[in-house]
């Protein structure tokens, strides 16, 4: 091992990166901060003690005892935080490894189902074909879940790489709207789109932003009753491009709203509608927007509807 490189408990930045935490949340850094506070407190206690207590030996003895107690408390608290951070890291690493290993067999299964359904391996009866369609649909759901788990793992470990570049958000949205056309039409939902002219280009990862918009549009359609309405606004807002999507669907109960962007959370009324979902989409969407230096929020009222919005910086920032 190179003695010039910090290691173990003294490699604060390395440990923070390992846990996927910011410096201010890192246990080792917090221990240093607490140590600085303790030392500062000791000096203050010494000067006050010297003023009120004449015997310096009693002052030194009291300070030594207090210092030892405070450092033991600080070490115990920091060690507890470190164990929690390590457990969280191992959980994220486990999810990432399992998700990665599941992708290959699920893809192979999908290809096999498609091959069988094509009839190239022999004639498939109509009654059998229906079962293969169900199998293919469930396989697709599993692949989506595994993909989301892998993204969450990369977000938590700070390993999700955003390939940012300058692009037209309007063109990206139009492509998404076109692909969603049949789904929206089949759901019997009216969509009203208001896009401001001459929008500035944005600087972000097109693939990740596409995932965010698709998730929000899918949710709006999924939780809106037939013959409902969805209103989409895209406009310039200062140095950002602003996107909002409003529906008149089931809405989110007031008591559930504070949990909406948490992992695996699904509101009570969403569960009652028995819609498919893992509860990861909104967590992923907000994380991507924030990593892209944007902001995301929502407003909702049960049985009235929901509006989700986000902003993304323009290329000039």
Image (cartoon, rainbow, N blue to C red):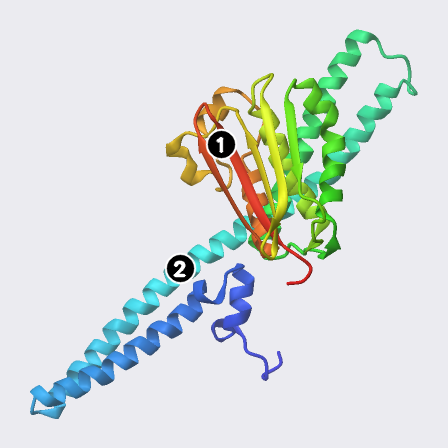
Between residues 20 and 314, which one lies in front from this camera angle?
A: 314
Query: Could you tell me residue 200's position as x and y percent?
Result: 70, 53
* Quarter containing the C terminus: bottom right
Q: CA distance from mark 2 to mark 1?
A: 29 Å
Q: Secondary structure at mark 2?
A: helix
Residues 214 and 124: in front is 214
* Residue underneath mark 1: 266
Residue 250 place in picture, x, y as percent: 49, 24
The one nearer the camera, 196 or 118, is: 196
Residue drawn 55% across and 69% down? 14
Q: Measuring 61% from the left and 38% from the top, which residue is drawn there?
A: 233
- Tell me: residue 96, above or below residue 302: below
224 sits to left or right of 138: left
Circle 2 Cα neighbour tier, 10 Å, few/some/many (<14 / 14–19 / ≥20)? some
The numbered disc on residue 184 is: none
Q: Residue at x 21, y 83 (%)?
A: 44
Residue 208 in the image, given as x and y percentages of width and height: 68, 47
Compared across the picture, whether 26 is left or right of 42 comes to right
Q: Quick check: 20 left or right of 43?
A: right
Q: On the image, numbered disc 2 is attached to which residue?
A: 81
Q: Quadrant of the N terminus?
A: bottom right
86 w.r.t. 177: above or below = below
Circle nearer the viewer, 2 or 1: 1
Q: Is residue 93 visible?
A: no
| Image x and y of residue 167, in percent | 75, 52
């Amino acid at each position: 091992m190179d003695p010039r490189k910090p290691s173990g408990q003294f490699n604060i930045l390395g440990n923070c990166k390992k846990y996927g935490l910011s410096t201010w949340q890192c246990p080792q850094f917090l221990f240093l901060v607490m140590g600085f506070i303790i030392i500062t407190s000791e000096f203050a206690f010494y000067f006050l003690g010297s003023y009120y207590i004449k015997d310096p030996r009693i002052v030194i003895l009291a300070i030594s005892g207090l210092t030892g107690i405070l450092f033991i408390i600080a070490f115990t608290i920091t060690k507890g935080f470190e164990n929690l951070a390590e457990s969280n890291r191992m959980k994220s690493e486990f999810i990432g490894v399992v998700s990665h290993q599941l992708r290959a067999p699920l893809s192979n299964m999908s290809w096999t189902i498609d091959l069988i359904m094509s009839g190239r391996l022999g004639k498939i009866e109509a009654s059998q074909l229906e079962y293969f369609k169900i199998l293919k649909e469930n396989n697709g759901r599993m692949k989506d879940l595994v993909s989301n788990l892998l993204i969450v793992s990369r977000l938590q470990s700070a390993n999700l790489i955003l390939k940012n570049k300058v692009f037209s958000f309007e063109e990206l949205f139009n492509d998404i709207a076109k692909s969603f056309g049949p789904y929206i039409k089949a759901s019997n939902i009216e969509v009203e789109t208001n896009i401001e002219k001459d929008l500035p280009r944005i600087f972000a990862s097109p693939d990740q932003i596409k995932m965010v918009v698709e998730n929000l549009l899918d949710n709006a359609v999924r939780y809106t009753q037939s013959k409902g309405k969805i209103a989409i606004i895209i406009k310039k807002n200062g140095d950002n491009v602003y996107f909002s999507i409003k529906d008149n669907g089931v809405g989110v109960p007031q008591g559930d709203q504070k949990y909406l962007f948490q992992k695996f959370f699904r509101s009570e009324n969403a569960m009652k509608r028995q819609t498919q979902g893992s509860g990861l989409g909104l967590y992923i969407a907000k994380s991507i927007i924030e990593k892209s230096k944007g902001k995301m929020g929502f407003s909702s009222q049960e049985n009235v509807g929901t509006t989700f919005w986000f902003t993304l910086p323009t290329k000039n920032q």
